[in-house]
Image (cartoon, rainbow, N blue to C red):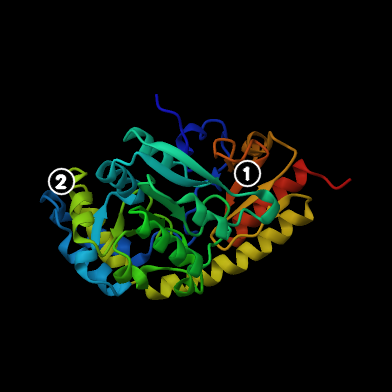
Amino acid sequence: MSRQIHGGDIYSYGKIAGNIRLIDFSANINPLGLPEGVKNAVIENLDDFSNYPDPLCRELVKEIALHENVPESYILCGSGAADIIYRIAEAVRPGITVVTAPTFSEYEEAVRAAGSNIKYYYLHKGNGFNAGKDILDEVGPGIDLMFLCNPNNPTGNLTDKKLVLALAEKCRENKTILAVDECFIDFLENAGEFSIVDCLHAYDNVIVLKAFTKIYAMAGIRLGYAMCSDKDIIQRLGRAGQPWSVSSVAQLCGTAALKETDYIHRTKKLIKENREKLTLELRSLGFEVFASCANFILFRTENKALSRELLKYGILIRSCDNFVGLDNSFFRIAVKSKEDNEYLVESLKKLTPKG
């Protein structure tokens, strides 16, 4: 059986939690749950699911293009962002790939499967895991691919848009493809100030990844997409995966989700308020908490058994010991509903009594 490297593995822990309801803080999913419009779209179109899906995702691509304000030719849909990541690795077949550390482990998993060597740019705790201008020095001759997660997972911090564009330019000079993962950027109230989607026309070596997984709570439906102004790259990504990789259900749900504008407004307000309160609560308990702009929080504690101890309260959190650059003293938690967050804090108080 393959090793679990992500959060969201509720299936292994249900029995451990006994009769207590399992609350999954290990997966960074929108606490508002699946939008009503998405639920209704599934129910109202059940009879259509006996047909093969559109292999070109035409209706969905049209809606994404309107939503992102990019040409339809820029877009390729896949079965979640992970599918797109593996397509990039297969299409590029990089000799050397640069990844930040710590960051989402799937980048490294995908390119190693494609035979790539890895070069790390380490993000350091001392400066809040922020990328500096020296990240530009990581790109040079022989670097075929670079991944940048913005906001970064698991740290939750942002890389300034000017620095990302400077990195895109440095990559272009060295014939390097830059893949920018913006899967969490829509949780930001000021997402437009950091997203580089509006600059794709100027950088044909840049691929932006996005997904419906987190922001629309559609993790089980599996839907993501890539955007790039280079038609050849989009075609190569298309050839790198299987046909009909996006199900009819996923296409329908994605089209419906993009109409849920009020849902997104409520999400951004909820996440900001709950993240700020949860951060303060964690700090008051003595944890070392790192500033986050996303819907999750990274913190550190000397109690390295914390994730195991929380299971007796039915709480699942993400141990970060398998992130390059972190160890088993780091944990990540999702920002959830007010009630779930309060239950987490009360449970932590029982494990870390004052004094």
Q: Quadrant of the C terminus?
A: top right
Q: Quadrant of the N terminus?
A: top left
Q: Position of residue 330 (x, y in %)?
A: 65, 42
Q: Is residue 232 visible?
A: yes
Q: Is residue 182 visible?
A: no
Q: Measuring 57% from the left and 33% from the top, which residue is drawn there?
A: 18
Q: Quadrant of residue 61?
A: bottom left
- Within 10 Å of disc 1 (Cα), the crowding (few <14, some 14-19, many 20+) is many
Q: Kindly state the secondary structure of the residue where label 1 is placed.
A: strand
Q: Kindly state the secondary structure of the residue where label 2 is placed.
A: loop
Q: Quadrant of residue 142?
A: top left
Disc 1 vs disc 2: Cβ atoms closer than 8 Å? no
Residue 243 tag number = 2
Q: Measuring 31% from the left and 59% from the top, which residue is drawn there?
A: 205
On the image, numbered disc 1 is attached to which residue?
A: 331
Q: Measuring 47% from the left and 46% from the top, which residue is drawn there?
A: 99
Give the alpha-carbon distance from disc 1 to disc 2, as whole Å: 38 Å
Q: Position of residue 240 (x, y in %)?
A: 21, 44
Kindly identify the amino acid type of the residue bearing the numbered disc 1. Answer: Phe
49 displayed left or right of 259? left
Q: Residue furthest right?
A: 355
Q: Measuring 40% from the left and 27% from the top, which residue is drawn there?
A: 2
Q: Residue furthest left?
A: 51
338 displayed left or right of 235? right
